[in-house]
Image (cartoon, rainbow, N blue to C red):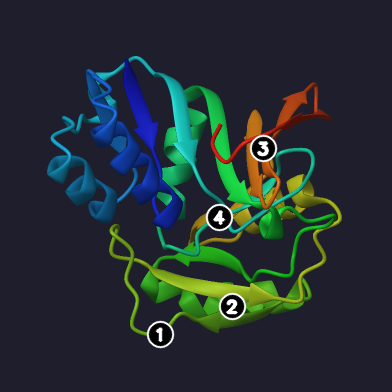
Amino acid sequence: MVLGIGTGSTVNELIAELKDRKIQLAGAVSSSNQTTLALQAARIPVLDLNTLAGLALYIDGADEADQHGVLIKGGGGALTREKVIAAASEKFICIIDDGKLVGSLGAFPLPVEVIPMARSHVARQLTKLGGHPVLREGVLTDNGNQILDVRNLRLSDPLGMEDEIDRIAGVVTVGLFARRPADLLLVAGDEGVRTIQISNRVPISITRPGGKP
Protein backbone atom coordinates (compact mmCIF):
# COMPACT_ATOMS: atom_id res chain seq x y z
CA MET A 1 0.00 0.00 0.00
CA VAL A 2 0.89 3.68 -0.14
CA LEU A 3 0.91 5.20 3.33
CA GLY A 4 0.42 8.85 4.34
CA ILE A 5 2.97 9.78 7.01
CA GLY A 6 3.04 12.82 9.30
CA THR A 7 5.85 14.66 11.05
CA GLY A 8 7.53 14.58 14.45
CA SER A 9 9.22 12.33 17.00
CA THR A 10 6.34 9.80 17.03
CA VAL A 11 6.50 9.48 13.26
CA ASN A 12 10.27 9.04 13.37
CA GLU A 13 9.68 6.02 15.62
CA LEU A 14 7.08 4.73 13.15
CA ILE A 15 9.48 5.00 10.23
CA ALA A 16 12.15 3.15 12.24
CA GLU A 17 9.62 0.36 12.93
CA LEU A 18 8.71 0.13 9.24
CA LYS A 19 12.39 -0.23 8.39
CA ASP A 20 13.24 -2.69 11.19
CA ARG A 21 10.27 -4.94 10.45
CA LYS A 22 11.04 -4.79 6.71
CA ILE A 23 7.44 -3.84 5.89
CA GLN A 24 7.19 -3.51 2.13
CA LEU A 25 5.33 -0.37 1.07
CA ALA A 26 4.65 0.73 -2.49
CA GLY A 27 5.58 4.16 -1.17
CA ALA A 28 4.64 6.93 1.21
CA VAL A 29 3.31 10.47 0.93
CA SER A 30 5.33 12.73 3.20
CA SER A 31 4.02 15.72 5.14
CA SER A 32 7.36 17.53 5.49
CA ASN A 33 10.95 17.77 4.29
CA GLN A 34 12.03 16.26 7.62
CA THR A 35 9.84 13.19 7.08
CA THR A 36 10.98 12.90 3.47
CA LEU A 37 14.61 12.63 4.61
CA ALA A 38 13.70 9.97 7.18
CA LEU A 39 11.75 7.95 4.60
CA GLN A 40 14.60 8.16 2.11
CA ALA A 41 17.05 6.99 4.77
CA ALA A 42 14.75 4.01 5.38
CA ARG A 43 14.62 3.38 1.60
CA ILE A 44 10.86 3.91 1.44
CA PRO A 45 9.86 5.53 -1.88
CA VAL A 46 8.39 9.03 -1.44
CA LEU A 47 5.46 9.69 -3.79
CA ASP A 48 3.67 12.85 -4.89
CA LEU A 49 0.07 13.01 -3.67
CA ASN A 50 -0.91 14.52 -7.04
CA THR A 51 -0.12 11.21 -8.73
CA LEU A 52 -2.55 9.27 -6.53
CA ALA A 53 -6.33 8.99 -6.44
CA GLY A 54 -6.23 9.12 -2.63
CA LEU A 55 -4.79 7.27 0.35
CA ALA A 56 -6.16 4.37 2.36
CA LEU A 57 -4.33 5.28 5.56
CA TYR A 58 -2.60 8.24 7.20
CA ILE A 59 -0.60 7.89 10.44
CA ASP A 60 0.59 10.82 12.54
CA GLY A 61 0.94 12.16 16.07
CA ALA A 62 -0.66 15.22 17.69
CA ASP A 63 0.05 17.88 20.29
CA GLU A 64 -3.39 17.42 21.88
CA ALA A 65 -6.37 15.14 21.27
CA ASP A 66 -9.80 14.79 22.81
CA GLN A 67 -12.01 11.71 23.13
CA HIS A 68 -13.76 12.57 19.84
CA GLY A 69 -10.56 12.47 17.80
CA VAL A 70 -10.38 16.26 17.45
CA LEU A 71 -6.75 17.35 17.44
CA ILE A 72 -4.39 20.25 17.80
CA LYS A 73 -1.42 19.77 15.46
CA GLY A 74 1.38 21.91 14.13
CA GLY A 75 3.96 21.96 16.90
CA GLY A 76 6.40 20.63 14.31
CA GLY A 77 5.35 23.25 11.75
CA ALA A 78 3.90 20.83 9.16
CA LEU A 79 0.20 21.51 9.81
CA THR A 80 -0.77 22.48 6.24
CA ARG A 81 0.61 19.39 4.53
CA GLU A 82 -0.62 17.21 7.39
CA LYS A 83 -4.14 18.56 6.96
CA VAL A 84 -4.03 17.96 3.20
CA ILE A 85 -2.92 14.36 3.64
CA ALA A 86 -5.53 13.75 6.35
CA ALA A 87 -8.25 15.09 4.06
CA ALA A 88 -7.08 12.82 1.22
CA SER A 89 -7.05 9.67 3.40
CA GLU A 90 -9.87 7.23 4.06
CA LYS A 91 -8.59 6.48 7.58
CA PHE A 92 -6.51 8.58 9.98
CA ILE A 93 -4.72 6.91 12.90
CA CYS A 94 -3.24 9.24 15.50
CA ILE A 95 -0.61 7.98 17.98
CA ILE A 96 -0.14 9.93 21.23
CA ASP A 97 0.99 9.43 24.82
CA ASP A 98 -1.66 9.69 27.50
CA GLY A 99 -0.46 13.14 28.58
CA LYS A 100 -1.76 14.51 25.27
CA LEU A 101 -5.28 13.10 25.70
CA VAL A 102 -7.27 15.96 27.23
CA GLY A 103 -10.82 16.65 28.32
CA SER A 104 -10.89 19.97 26.48
CA LEU A 105 -8.46 21.35 23.93
CA GLY A 106 -6.46 24.52 24.34
CA ALA A 107 -3.65 24.09 26.87
CA PHE A 108 -1.27 23.66 23.92
CA PRO A 109 -0.97 26.91 21.88
CA LEU A 110 -2.92 26.68 18.63
CA PRO A 111 -0.61 26.98 15.57
CA VAL A 112 -1.82 29.09 12.64
CA GLU A 113 0.20 29.17 9.42
CA VAL A 114 0.05 32.57 7.75
CA ILE A 115 1.35 34.26 4.61
CA PRO A 116 4.16 36.57 5.84
CA MET A 117 2.63 39.80 4.49
CA ALA A 118 -0.61 39.03 6.37
CA ARG A 119 0.95 38.22 9.75
CA SER A 120 -0.06 41.43 11.53
CA HIS A 121 -3.56 41.47 10.04
CA VAL A 122 -4.17 37.86 11.04
CA ALA A 123 -2.79 38.51 14.53
CA ARG A 124 -5.25 41.38 15.02
CA GLN A 125 -8.18 39.19 13.94
CA LEU A 126 -7.08 36.37 16.26
CA THR A 127 -6.90 38.86 19.12
CA LYS A 128 -10.51 39.86 18.38
CA LEU A 129 -11.44 36.19 18.78
CA GLY A 130 -9.96 36.27 22.27
CA GLY A 131 -6.57 34.79 21.48
CA HIS A 132 -3.05 35.93 22.25
CA PRO A 133 -0.98 35.26 19.10
CA VAL A 134 2.82 35.11 19.24
CA LEU A 135 5.10 34.76 16.22
CA ARG A 136 7.17 31.56 16.26
CA GLU A 137 10.53 33.27 15.91
CA GLY A 138 13.04 32.08 13.34
CA VAL A 139 10.67 29.52 11.80
CA LEU A 140 9.56 29.26 8.19
CA THR A 141 7.37 26.34 7.15
CA ASP A 142 8.26 24.10 4.21
CA ASN A 143 5.76 26.26 2.29
CA GLY A 144 7.73 29.46 3.04
CA ASN A 145 5.18 30.81 5.54
CA GLN A 146 5.22 31.88 9.19
CA ILE A 147 3.45 30.45 12.23
CA LEU A 148 1.51 32.27 14.93
CA ASP A 149 1.06 30.29 18.15
CA VAL A 150 -2.20 31.36 19.78
CA ARG A 151 -2.97 31.03 23.49
CA ASN A 152 -6.15 31.68 25.46
CA LEU A 153 -8.65 30.77 22.70
CA ARG A 154 -11.88 29.16 23.87
CA LEU A 155 -12.12 25.87 21.97
CA SER A 156 -15.42 24.53 23.31
CA ASP A 157 -16.63 24.55 19.69
CA PRO A 158 -13.51 23.45 17.78
CA LEU A 159 -15.29 23.03 14.44
CA GLY A 160 -16.75 26.53 14.67
CA MET A 161 -13.36 27.98 15.63
CA GLU A 162 -11.63 26.13 12.78
CA ASP A 163 -14.11 27.62 10.31
CA GLU A 164 -13.79 31.09 11.87
CA ILE A 165 -10.00 31.16 11.63
CA ASP A 166 -9.99 29.66 8.13
CA ARG A 167 -12.06 32.63 6.95
CA ILE A 168 -9.40 35.18 7.95
CA ALA A 169 -7.61 36.49 4.83
CA GLY A 170 -3.96 35.45 4.94
CA VAL A 171 -4.47 32.26 6.94
CA VAL A 172 -3.10 29.21 5.16
CA THR A 173 -4.10 26.62 7.76
CA VAL A 174 -5.09 26.43 11.39
CA GLY A 175 -3.84 23.48 13.43
CA LEU A 176 -7.34 22.46 14.58
CA PHE A 177 -8.33 19.11 13.10
CA ALA A 178 -12.07 19.19 13.80
CA ARG A 179 -13.53 19.03 10.31
CA ARG A 180 -11.31 16.02 9.63
CA PRO A 181 -10.57 14.40 13.03
CA ALA A 182 -8.72 11.16 13.68
CA ASP A 183 -10.67 7.93 13.12
CA LEU A 184 -8.67 6.03 15.73
CA LEU A 185 -6.44 7.08 18.62
CA LEU A 186 -3.62 4.89 19.95
CA VAL A 187 -2.89 6.22 23.44
CA ALA A 188 0.31 4.97 25.07
CA GLY A 189 0.66 4.92 28.84
CA ASP A 190 2.43 3.09 31.65
CA GLU A 191 -0.07 0.22 31.46
CA GLY A 192 0.16 -0.26 27.70
CA VAL A 193 -1.69 1.08 24.68
CA ARG A 194 -5.34 2.07 24.77
CA THR A 195 -7.26 2.15 21.50
CA ILE A 196 -10.04 4.70 21.09
CA GLN A 197 -12.11 4.01 17.98
CA ILE A 198 -14.12 7.04 16.91
CA SER A 199 -17.54 5.83 15.72
CA ASN A 200 -20.04 8.45 14.56
CA ARG A 201 -18.16 10.98 16.69
CA VAL A 202 -18.81 8.84 19.80
CA PRO A 203 -15.62 7.43 21.41
CA ILE A 204 -15.40 3.71 22.12
CA SER A 205 -12.52 2.80 24.45
CA ILE A 206 -10.73 -0.55 24.27
CA THR A 207 -7.96 -1.35 26.78
CA ARG A 208 -5.07 -3.27 25.29
CA PRO A 209 -2.20 -4.65 27.40
CA GLY A 210 1.40 -4.47 26.37
CA GLY A 211 3.67 -1.69 25.24
CA LYS A 212 2.92 -1.73 21.50
CA PRO A 213 -0.23 -1.66 19.36
Mark 4: amino acid? Lys
Which residue is identified by label 4?
73
Mark 2: amino acid? Ala
Q: Find residue 182 and report its horizontal and vertical position in percent.
A: 63, 35
Between the residue at mark 3 and the residue at mark 1, the CA separation in whole angstroms equals 29 Å
Q: Residue at x 74, y 55 (%)?
A: 161
* For residue 183, side relative to residue 4 (left or right): right
Label 4 crowd (10 A; few <14 / some 14-19 / many >=20) = many
Residue 179 numbered tag? 3
Q: Residue at x 23, y 53 (%)?
A: 33
Answer whether labels 4 and 2 touch (C-beta < 8 Å).
no
Between the residue at mark 3 and the residue at mark 2, the CA separation in whole angstroms equals 23 Å
Mark 3: amino acid? Arg
Which residue is identified by label 1?
137
Dot placed on the residue nearer the N-terminal end, 3 or 1: 1
Which residue is identified by label 2?
123
Determine the secondary structure under disc 4: loop
Answer whether labels 3 and 1 touch (C-beta < 8 Å).
no
Q: Please identify the quadrant where the N terminus is shown.
A: top left
Q: Find residue 168 and report its horizontal and vertical position in percent.
A: 60, 60
* 193 in relation to 132, above or below: above
Residue 97 numbered tag? none
